[in-house]
Image: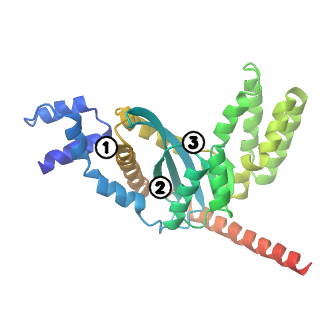
Amino acid sequence: ERALTTVIATCYLKGVSTRRMNDLVATLGINNLSKSQVSQMAKELDDMVDDFRTRRLDQGPYHFVSCDALTMKVREGGRVVKTSVLLATGVNADGYRELLGMQVATAESTASWTGFFRDLIARGLTGVFLVTSDAHLGIQAAVGDCLPQASWQRCRTHFAKNLSAQVPKTQWPTLSAMFHTIFQQPDAASVWAQAREVIEFCQQKFPHVATYLEECLDELLAFTAAPRAVWTKIWSNNPTERLNREIRRRTDVVGIFPNRDAVVRLVGAVLAEQHDDWIQQKRYMSLTSLAQTKEIIAAGVIDEDRDNNQEIAA
């Protein structure tokens, strides 16, 4: 029975459908596993998932954090409702990626993101230099409230999608090519200079785009404050999007979850599995880049203290 439970739990984690599980266990002489039986057996994952979700974040500082949210359908009160799964990944002090946390919220809001970040901080999240996400106002507000020393990086991929909606489809290839030249520069000064060139170009043909781009420039180019070697890993949420696709691959088999606990069980198990894979892979960021980031943070603290002292003296 223990072996059977392990098989069912593993299949559940891998996103195997109930029908395919029935075919599998039939080879063991067991017929007609019900969905409730499968779910009951899969609950052995609960302790593992809970330990993972509530573990101490003691491998920091986590200078770079990425956040995103997924929508899941759940049955509640006789209705099918949408819930938001809040996710955060980060790079630890040894340069490896970690799944920092996940929570299921009624909606993606300022309150839910604030509660999420506060939980991460209570578990040990420290030293955050930059948070990358889409432009959801709830994330922005929560970062400002909970991580006031961190910068917010607006995902360039999401921004480009929004930018494409600002011009006719026939004009987007030209604007897209110009936009991407901003991110092909060798250093921060060149990035900002090229951004100004693109804005000037847009002022001639798409003045509304020029205004939009200029208003978003600080948040779009926040990555330039970090070491050049990590830019490609922090200027968008693309790495997290790949994780999202893997979660979707597993959860699409379920479709509508019977309750929120089931969402936590499956998504949490997938995240724990991915977390273990990341720790076994090569470093995501070099120790040199992280040391340079630490120096940048220290220099910023010194400059801030100097400015504060000058204000007091004045």
Quarter occupied by residue 309: bottom right
Residues at marks 2 and 1, CA–CA distance in whole angstroms: 18 Å
Quarter occupied by residue 61: bottom right
The colour style of the image is: rainbow
Name the residue that disc number 3 marks.
238
Q: Is mark 3 on a helix, strand or loop?
A: helix
Q: Nearer the viewer, mark 2 or mark 1?
A: 2
Quadrant in which the C terminus is drawn: bottom right
* Closer to the camera in the image, 155 or 191: 155
Q: Do the residues labelled 2 and 1 touch (CB within 8 Å)?
A: no
For disc 3, the neighbor class at 10 Å (few under 14, some 14 to 19, many from 20) is some
* Closer to the camera in the image, 35 or 193: 35
Is 71 located above or below residue 275 in the figure?
above
Which amino acid, mark 1? Leu
For disc 1, the neighbor class at 10 Å (few under 14, some 14 to 19, many from 20) is many
Residue displayed at 84% across by 31% down: 208
Which disc is residue 101 wearing? Answer: 2
Quarter occupied by residue 149: bottom right
Q: In this view, does 309 lie to the left or right of 51?
A: right
Which amino acid, mark 2? Gly
Residue displayed at 69% across by 35% down: 160
- Mark yes or no: residue 95 visible: no
Residues at marks 2 and 3, CA–CA distance in whole angstroms: 18 Å
Q: Which of the marked residues, 2 or 3, is nearer the chain's N terminus?
A: 2
Where does the image place residue 250, in percent across and percent down from the top left?
37, 37
Which disc is residue 13 wearing? Answer: 1
Q: Is mark 2 on a helix, strand or loop?
A: strand
Figure disc tally = 3
